[in-house]
Image: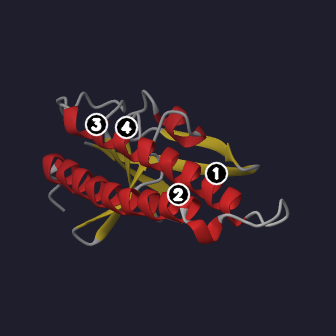
Amino acid sequence: MHIDKHEILSLMINQLRADLSVCEQAVKIARDTATHADAQGSSRYETMGLEASYLAQGQGLRLLEVERSLAYFMQLKLPASTGSIGLSSLIVLRDEQGDEQLLWLAADAGGMKIQYADTTITVITPKSPLGAALIGKAAGDELDISIAGVERYYEVCTVY
């Protein structure tokens, strides 16, 4: 399969823009709900307004996260591949069952998934156990790592 990292980066930016739009709508709805007259209870036991304000606060934090991730990817310059894994590396990783996955190592947006051709690419960060273990590895390297208390074995197949 031919890999075009610039196209993948564009797909990530588009995904984040779509997420941003959804978050902005969710924040607006949550704020409108929290401040609507029907949400204000007639006694201290009616907490719909308070609950709606907590929801609005959570949605606001999510919006900030997506804005930060979008800013990160929009300013990202793709370095030439050095062969070893670092930020902006695209990694083909094979587990002990022979299943392969594509991972993009980034400083932000961990857990985001995008579709590229027939494949799902998952963004991971160096803050995750797998991301931290991959830093500096190269094609052909193997690693054993404990994730959520389960020992896992991986082989780095390709680094782009």
Question: Could you tell me how far apart the alpha carbons at marks 3 and 4 are, in whole angstroms?
Answer: 5 Å
Is the residue under label 1 in contact with that under label 3 (CB below 8 Å)? Answer: no
Q: Position of residue 99 (x, y in %)?
A: 47, 65
Quadrant of residue 78 within the rendered picture? top left
Q: Which residue is mark 4?
A: 68
Q: Earlier in the sequence, mark 2 or mark 4?
A: 4
Outermost residue toward the right?
A: 45
Is the residue under label 4 in contact with that under label 3 (CB below 8 Å)? Answer: yes
Q: Residue at x 60, y 39 (%)?
A: 129
The secondary structure type at the circle numbered 2 is strand
Q: Which residue is mark 3?
A: 71
Amino acid on which the number 4 mark rests in the picture? Arg
Q: Residue at x 40, y 41 (%)?
A: 140
Q: Which residue is mark 1?
A: 152
Report how many numbered discs are placed on residues in the image: 4
Is 29 drawn above or below residue 80 in the view shown? below
Mark 2 surroundings: few (<14), some (14-19) or many (≥20) residues within 10 A? some
Q: Seen in the image, is 33 located left or right of residue 93?
A: right
Is 132 drawn above or below residue 7 in the view shown? above
Mark 3 surroundings: few (<14), some (14-19) or many (≥20) residues within 10 A? some
Amino acid on which the number 1 mark rests in the picture? Arg
Question: Could you tell me how far apart the alpha carbons at marks 1 and 4 are, in whole angstroms?
Answer: 31 Å
The secondary structure type at the circle numbered 4 is helix
Rendered image: mark on residue 95: 2
Is 67 drawn above or below residue 43 in the view shown? above
Q: Position of residue 45 (x, y in %)?
A: 85, 64
Q: Earlier in the sequence, mark 1 or mark 4?
A: 4
Question: Could you tell me how far apart the alpha carbons at marks 2 and 1 are, in whole angstroms?
Answer: 8 Å
Q: Earlier in the sequence, mark 2 or mark 1?
A: 2
Mark 1 surroundings: few (<14), some (14-19) or many (≥20) residues within 10 A? some
Q: Position of residue 61 (x, y in %)?
A: 51, 44
Is the residue under label 1 in contact with that under label 2 (CB below 8 Å)? Answer: yes
